[in-house]
Amino acid sequence: MERVEGFRRRALVACAAAFAVGLMGLAGEANAQFDELIPTKVGLVKFAGSPAVGKLYKLVSKAPNPPLFLLPSADPAATGGSVAVGISPGRLDCTLAAQAYDGIEGWKTLGPPATPKGYKYINNLAPGGIAGPCKMILVKQKVIKVITKGTGGLPAPVGLSPSVDTVLTLGGDDYCAQWVAPHDKEIANKLIKDKNRLAPVACPVIPSTTTTLPGTTTTTGGATTTTTGGETTTTTGGETTTTTTTLPPQPLDHYRLYPALGLDGPLVHIEDQFHPGSVGEDVDLGRAEFFLVPADKNGEGIINPADHLTCYDIPEGSFSAMVTVSNQFDDLGPQYLEVYNPDALCVPTEKNPMPPGQPLMRDHYKCYGAAGSPVFRSVTLMDQFQDAYVMVLHPILFCNPADKNGEGIVNQIDHLTCYATDPPGLIPPMVTIRNQFHQQGEYLELGPSLALCVPGKKIGWTPVTTTTTTQETTTTAIVDTTTTTTTSTPTTTLLPPPPCEQSLPPACDGACPPGTECVQAGPLCVCELSIAVCGDGQFGPPLCWGSCPPEAPICRDMGGMCVCTPY
């Protein structure tokens, strides 16, 4: 009876639309719009992380036979569409592009275009691309499927979920499903799973959720709203209202660290837990030197697959402290790190960005050189570039959340500790990035992965004060009456070498990322993996890496130099 009523509703809508067209005297066929209420054969949501957010969403709906599902009223390659998934209090949204499949993303028509058997949307860039986390949408008369990956914007429900609501919109047509509690299987912060659920009696209403991200300015009518950190300032006419809002902390993924070669960063003001308030520093950032890619460690999943960090060199600075950290590797107790001079500022970044570009709710991180005992963990890592089995060794970087130019900090709790890994990975392809420093995008050349950055907590820290002893020296001046001739020597300014691919063979003297060298390949110059020896200058502290003899197999930073040491 429920299915019949659904068909009656959509038939009435179609008839009303056709009748309205006829009354208006318009030529052509009416564009009927309908609500298709679909049952759930299989429904699955997986969560990961702390706090838990979506990792995978899957819906499979099979039509009773008869009746069959209606196909969209118009070709979705022309109309586009959207997907909304609601699990109170969160919501996941995807925009399905109005375009035919181009080998990367878009719609495929199944069967002859004049008499299609269905439509399929493919997003090979998921969780990036236009459709974001939506990886595949299939609409046929007998089956409908929706699959998303990396659904980081969908937080796990607090307690047990009352329902999982889904609305797939194609043109003006809605396909609606709902799984109501009690669910067949539900594990808090881990899993919701249902099978063989009936179609809903009506399309569910999924509340919209709007989050204003730090560093954004919006204008509506005569009102301008600016969000900085947790403060929202609204100016209407001459009146200004400031509202303080507590933003939800964003959980951190593991990151795989790749050496990088890119453009310089600007002059910025940085404050962090080591240099707060008035002791914050103005830093003229150097070149991009690291690129951090979210990684799946030992099958634990990735929370925010589109979340990357580009780290720009901090060319100078002095600091020393003993820091106690806690993370996944301290099963034998907290880890004690010697943390020293600032090394880089890491900036939230889009990789292979698509217009118009979205602000990222991710903190900046100020990274310092670090030294400590090796953890010796064998782990499997999966990221966008490669899978690898590596040994996690000693810490090399420690990263604090940082306030850049007064933009605030969303998550004060989580920090990153980066550990050297061996062996190094393959050289990834060149990537295009966009962030606050390079709004029009820039290219990064990457070297082989050398480290794994692990989220954790900073339990405490103690600054280390260096005492300098000054020895008084008496100097006797000697007057020389000899005539002195001063010769002026012209100064030559050395320009940095061009990128490797812009240099010419056989010299091939262009610049490459650390761990690679510029070599001739036919008529071109390309960056290839070099054979590094610890301390030969290819990898400088704190990122020390290279071959060592068996009796001292660990290449590590010792007093600002890369040396081979025993375990």
Image (cartoon, rainbow, N blue to C red):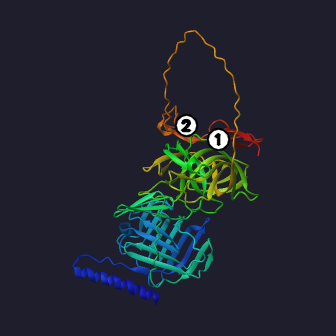
Q: Residue furthest left?
A: 25
Residue 403 versus residue 121 in the image, above or below = above
- Please state which amino acid type lies under the numbered disc 1: Pro
Q: At numbered mark 2, what does the secondary structure look like: helix, strand or loop?
A: strand
Q: Is 78 drawn above or below residue 71 in the view shown?
A: above
Q: Which residue is mark 1?
A: 541
Answer yes or no: is residue 49 visible. yes
Q: Residues within 10 Å of mark 2 (few under 14, many from 20)?
A: many
> Reading the chain from its start, which is encountered first: label 1 or label 2?
2
Q: 341 left or right of 433? A: right
Real-space CA distance between mark 1 and mark 2, rounded to the nearest whole angstrom: 25 Å
User: Residue beneath label 2, please?
Assistant: 519
Disc 1 to disc 2: CB gap under 8 Å: no
Who's the residue at 53% across and 69% down the image? 154
> Which quarter of the figure has residue 20?
bottom left
Against 98, residue 12 (above or below) is below
Q: Percent position (x, y) of residue 77? A: 38, 66
Mark 1 or 2: the one toward you: 1
Residue farthest right in this picture: 551
Is 153 or 112 nearer to us in this picture? 153
